[in-house]
Amino acid sequence: MEFHFNKDTLSDFTANIHREWAITNGIGGYAGSSVLGAHNRTHQGYLIASYHPPVERYMVFSKTNETIEQADTTWDLTTGQYAGEPISRTVVSGEDVPEEYKRSDTVNVESDFVPRRPVYRTGNQFLADFCYDGNVHFTYQMGELTIRKTIFMVQGHNKTVILYDVDNAGGEATLSVTPLFNFRDHSGSSTPETLQFDTQKIESEDPRKLNGVLLYPKNQPDEYYVWLSGSPCDIRDNDSLYDVDMQFQTEVDNEVSGLDCNYTPYQLCFSIPAHGNCRHAIICETGKKEELTADLGNLERDVLAHADLYYAESVKFYNHLLEKAQYSDDDFANTLVLASNQFLAKRQSTGLMTVLAGLPWFTDWGRDTMIAFTGLTLCTKRFQEAADILKTFSMYVHHGMVPNMFPDNGAEPMYNTVDASLWYFYAVERFLTYTGTEEAKRYIQKEIYPALKEIIAAYKNGTDFSIYMDRDYLIHAGSGTDQVTWMDVRVGDWVVTPRHGKPVEISALWYNALRVMEDLATQFGDGNDAKTYGELAQHVRESFCREFWYEEGGYLYDVVDGEEKDASLRPNQIYAVSLPYTMLSEEQAASVVKVVQDQLVAGPGIRSLAPSHKDYHPIYLGSLPKRDAAYHQGTAWGFLMGGFLSAYMKVNHHSPEAAQKAMDFLEPVKEHLTENCVGSICEIFDGDAPHLGRGCYAQAWSVGEVLRSYTEDIKPYLK
């Protein structure tokens, strides 16, 4: 499974700066950039380390810039976007807006934001190939020299490795590598004033042994060091200590300056012999000083040998994931298996696995975890990780609620969600269905079932955020400025999508949860509880069918609140069809799917609001208030495609013809795998064509739900 981009594609800077890649280390750390080698957003670099896994993430190693010298010729392979002069207001409001800004509406006279004209360093002109296969490979071609630069992370460690494989058909040459260091929160930015280090250069007398740089960042509270080591090389002082005004185009699109500064004290110079090939390596890692002193004290580490070992382990790791998932030569499924791994990380506070909601900035969110759970762990046959995730969230149930979010700053979890706890029942039901063992059943009974009973009791009797079962047995949620469904944007006191009352998907999930509990109680010998849950579920069914069906539209109301019923056409109703236990008649379910198909399907995602609605926003772009106004008001979401496809296959009785049609719906998703984050699926898309990817460039529930619906509901029924 490989993705390649050739020279013709890579030579166009502005058309490809939004094509990105990402790799992770399994503890919350990650690396990423564009296929060109230039960074595109604040959250990109070669080593973003997690100091309290999977949170407290710091950019410590931005990238490397390479230069080749051979005889009288110098090739600068540096690729980047830098900020030039400000673009004047008169130009911004006129017809001469630079081409790179014309694809957005962010440059306008209403905005206070004044962009700076980009200046490009175009080392991408020497790029012959970019390849992503779980790891990342750039191949440069200059005259008689070919250099393959491989970037990967070491699983379980805040450590990134760069390998250089050089084929030289000409005379002797030198590869000069400039490491760009940083030390900042991964959402922040640096300046020369904030970026101060104590720096130590270490060189071994034995050319086979350690050479490198130890840096202590002065702007951090703990004794964290950054250590970069290289295979045999000369370490030379650089002409400039700082690389300034690196500009990130995605941030500019979002109407912020998008600038950063990096620390560049040294160059590492590697010899390239004439008429032959060679290999060099750089390893960058970070941690407490005592964690690094073993290597520094005796200078015994052979950097290249270690790098080769790490690379072999990386390839073995990805191959193992594919073998475990057992999708043979299905490239689409295998691509999503590798993408799924990027969101799984160990949580230090529990010692168990958790799910990061999206790259590059989200942490572990309860709602996202439970929705993505089946695709990420069960469809990939990672059953132990699945059990860990269920246990992680059971440990944090509070007032009958699963956490909505574990913050990135180590604070206490937040519980402002009504649906995460209800999706938890779905995850448990799927876990038992996929594992199918007595051991799994005993695990759920002992470790998870008590938390499930606590949740049902809390929702029935009432808990935080105005969550309670009303007299009609449906769940009420939210009041005031609370936003407790997944459509949760609030700007100050402006509640963008107020859904207080009884949202349709919450009632669907509530019914599903009660039926799951009825089944579990029966299996666990709790006959009285099983009867109670079953009777309650029947009451919910009767009320739901009476209150939510919108006869005129042939679909479901989005929210019911007393006599008020919101007929806005939204995708939330699809779960009243797709969940394992549902309440609609076959005719009603088919009508819901048809309406969603006709009005909400939008390329790789499903619109959050119908285009005919007065509040529909087709493009998600610009300043934060502009984006928030569109987030759930027309923006298409990748994860909703999973629920839609399952519902589509369900109402069409999983026929081979329906499976083939479902594959047509997946074609835009397949195309998208090469358009934003290579091999993964974005969080959101513009509601209007061409449905450009936005938000997080890789989202857990987007990947998980597409993989789940494809492998559960489509693949088994294809002719």
Image (cartoon, rainbow, N blue to C red):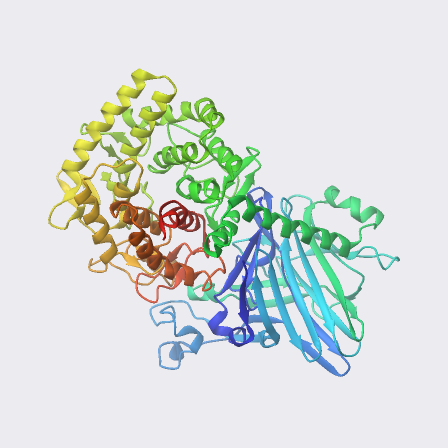
The answer to whether residue 77 is seen in the rendering is no
Numbered marks: total? 0
The residue at 39%/44% (across/down) is 712
138 relative to 498 in the view: left or right = right
The answer to whether residue 710 is seen in the rendering is yes
Query: Residue 347 location, x and y as percent?
Result: 55, 38
Query: Residue 320 location, x and y as percent?
Result: 59, 46
The residue at 43%/23% (across/down) is 445
Query: Residue 703 location, x and y as percent?
Result: 43, 50
Q: Residue furthest bottom?
A: 72
Which of 366/448 is in front? Answer: 448
Q: Residue furthest right?
A: 205
Q: Residue furthest front?
A: 719
In this view, 127 is above or below 308: below
Which of 308/326 is in front? Answer: 326
Which of 426/108 is in front? Answer: 426
Query: Residue 312 location, x and y as percent?
Result: 68, 52
In this view, 153 is above or below 125: above
Quarter of the rendering occupied by the N terminus: bottom right
Which of 545/527 is in front? Answer: 527
545 relative to 600 in the view: left or right = left
301 relative to 657 in the view: left or right = right
In this view, 438 is above or below 551: above
The residue at 23%/57% (across/down) is 598
